[in-house]
Image: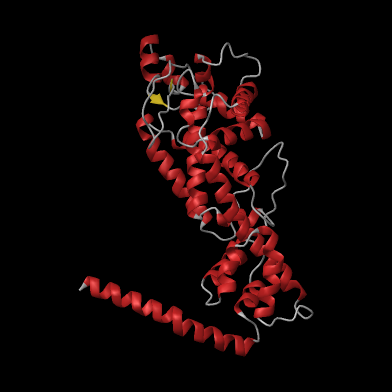
Amino acid sequence: MKHFLRVLTQLLVLLYCKCLWRGLKFVIRKVTGRCELQRICYNNKPGARRTLKIETSLKCSKHELLQSAVSVPPDSVEKTIDDIMSLKKINLDTNPQLGISLQACLFQIVGYRNLVVEVEKLRREPYDCENPAHEEMLMKLWKELRPDSPLSDRISKQWCEIGFQGNDPKTDFRGMGLLGLHNLLYFAEHDKATTLQVLHDSLQPKHSMHASIMHPHIPFFCSCFFFIPITVMRRNVPKEEASKMSKAEWDKKQFDKAIGYSFAIVGINITDLAYSLLVSGALKTHLYNVAPEMPSLVHFQQTFCYLMQEFHRFWMEEDPCDIMEFNRVRTKFHKSILKQLKNPDMALCPHFTASDLHLVNL
């Protein structure tokens, strides 16, 4: 019975989409004198609200020209818009702004599609220690994060200081390939003050104004495919209570929470989160609102920087009992970002001190 109802529902939806909806659109066009693309552009402000509706309209159209418009190369966008205007019999002289609006939307749609391809290519490219360009990027990352501490050797325990698992960081890039390294380096180069602060906090977590004392790193498996070494901190205790404790009691009371994390490993983990948002299409809301034309790799990297800052804040606010809660915190953070992105007017709007690209909230 359930199967029958499911099939019946699908048939009714198909009937509505194929017949009733198209008939309704025909009637609306006759009454208003405008096609669906015109109505969308005139009734919605620039940004995700407009572009998402244009994208849906093009994909669901019965005309092959409109269906294929979302996948044309960037240099064919202008010609495609001219063809659409001709197909819809829209007079450019009386609707000059329409062509401009449609072109802006199509550039965003095509740009997002190309960005997914570019990001996927970086993700699939493995880190190669024999590649001078890869090694140069890795060395730059160290210099940005540890400017006053020269690296003793390429294979060194010093890499753990910036949150890698072992003596050679190349093994940590297996999950996200070069994409993880690109994002970490971008964060370090374009918002250095914030990056160093987040790194410092991850190594020496603090609450309020009470001092924290660090314990040696304890590795623990806390993600779907990443090992993230964790630091254990002393828990804050009110001064009145602390004054009544012996040193042994103080130490026992303070070492009760795992609150730190390894910067580089979490950065690769957040890269995976940003990648999943991009591929699923969830980031369209944000990118269509901040990229007036074509979303680029820079927009994606700036989004990563925002997510790193927000996750760091979120992690501290969640105040997890121990590292066993990492997956819970990450999942909750992921859901909170998805919830924000459901708002078509939402722009995550990263704040950078040295960004070379101005983000515009349309």
The relative height of residue 336 versus residue 248 in the rendered view (above or below) is below
Quadrant occupied by the C terminus: bottom right
Q: Quick one: 256 or 204, which is closer to the camera?
A: 204
Q: Position of residue 46 (x, y in %)?
A: 67, 64
| Residue furthest out toward the left | 1
The relative height of residue 349 versus residue 91 in the rendered view (above or below) is above
Name which residue lies at 61% across and 41% down: 301
Left or right, residue 144 beside residue 312? right
Quadrant occupied by the N terminus: bottom left
Residue 7, image quadrant: bottom left
The relative height of residue 57 versus residue 142 in the rendered view (above or below) is below
Name which residue lies at 62% across and 66% down: 50
Q: Position of residue 353 (x, y in %)?
A: 70, 36
Name which residue lies at 48% across and 43% down: 273
Q: Is residue 205 visible?
A: no
Q: Position of residue 282 (x, y in %)?
A: 51, 54
Left or right, residue 132 beside residue 75? left
Q: Is residue 112 visible?
A: yes
Q: Position of residue 287 (x, y in %)?
A: 61, 53
Total numbered circles: 0
Q: Quick one: 70 or 208, which is closer to the camera?
A: 70
| Residue furthest out toward the right | 93
Coloured how? secondary structure
